[in-house]
Amino acid sequence: MVTSLYLLPTGECNCVCTYCYCLSEGKRGDPDLFLRIVESFTDHILSSNPRSRPQIRFTGGEPWMEKKLLPEVIELFFRKVPEGLVVVNTNGILLPEDSLRVWRGDERLIHVISLDGPAALHNSRRKSKDGRGTFHEVIKGVEMLLDLDLPVYLNAVLDTESSGHLSELMHFISSELGLDELSISLLHVDTDPLSPEDRYSLLKNAYSEASSRSIRLGGHHRLLLGSWIPELRCNAGSATALVDPEGMVHACQRFVGRVNPDCMWTDDFDWNGFNSGQQCGPVCGGNDEQIVGRKLYELYSKEYPEYLQSHNLDRILFGVLA
Ligand code: SF4
Ligand code: SF4
């Protein structure tokens, strides 16, 4: 049964990050279609009363380019499903303070914002379309959300370059922003073809830095542990459905533009019976990811046993966990 609806309302973005893997055509979806999808999804939740917390997760492109659609969806979903959760994955630059003020202090509306490192590093990779580094705008957005008492989490892309700046980034987010959790995501192996050993080394260094600063880590790499920690096994494709700007349904954002979608969304979409043909095994990826996952599990067992169970940050970052 789908309890976590991912919406990709637009492939458009105001940024041109060096490693972006979003839809190259950058198409915008039909807002009316997305509202219909959300109405249908909320009706399904109300009639099925699922055990898992119902959630809507925006991804992109940059979701806040749809500044009219997002508030409409959030208002509709919270009104009909008050126990629901909305998570917006965003670059943090277009956050509309006027609209967001309505939800001041509402813990159900969560933003996950990309910040790759200290200013110089972030600005060299994450630029606006007119070529400006975005660090200061991102921080302004984070501070605005904190002022509104809305939950905000940061996600840093981890590769060889950013690994060398993690210490500075962690110091900044804890001393300047008062945050004690950080999501880190390795680049997709197609974009950054490192060996499993090198990918593991990046993660090991991140855990060492985080531990010395009392920061808890989460992020996509946790989905490499599903063979050893069953709670971290991905359930995308039955617990989730993602709808792209063309109205096509996928199990997961990682499949958009890479493999054929499952179907086109229609008004009679079967939220209870959806079972994607794109489901994966217990680990997110192939044999190399299994190697990274096993090494990470051994590291946790030896040095960081607190990570041997799924934690709240995992559930905030992923709708794919059961
Ligand atoms: S903000 Fe996200 S969608 Fe936009 S260019 Fe950067 S990675 Fe791509
Ligand atoms: S395991 Fe498969 S479905 Fe799950 S997040 Fe990874 S690529 Fe997506």
Image: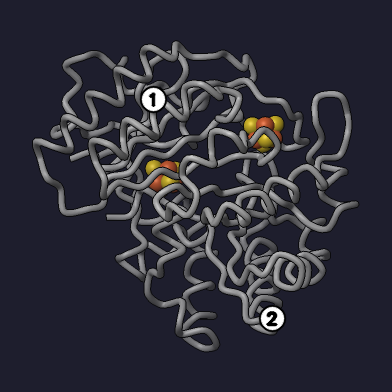
Instruction: Dividing the image into four quarters, tell me where ligand 1 lies.
Output: top right
Crowd tier of the residue under label 1, counting other residues whose Cα lies within 10 Å: few below 14, some 14–19, many 20 or above: many
Q: Which residue is mark 2?
A: 213
- Taking the spot 16% from the left edge, 32% from the top edge, the residue there is 44
Q: Check disc 2 and give the amino acid type.
A: Arg
State the image quarter where residue 213 is shown.
Answer: bottom right
Crowd tier of the residue under label 2, counting other residues whose Cα lies within 10 Å: few below 14, some 14–19, many 20 or above: some
State the image quarter where residue 134 is shown.
Answer: top right
Q: Quadrant of the N terminus?
A: top left
Residue 206: x %, y % from top left: 67, 70
Residue 127: x %, y % from top left: 81, 35
Residue 237: x %, y % from top left: 29, 38
Residue 32: x %, y % from top left: 38, 12
75 sits left or right of 66 in the view: left
Q: Which residue is mark 1?
A: 243
Tell me the SS state at disc 2.
loop
Tell me the SS state at disc 1.
strand
- Taking the spot 44% from the left edge, 22% from the top edge, the residue there is 244
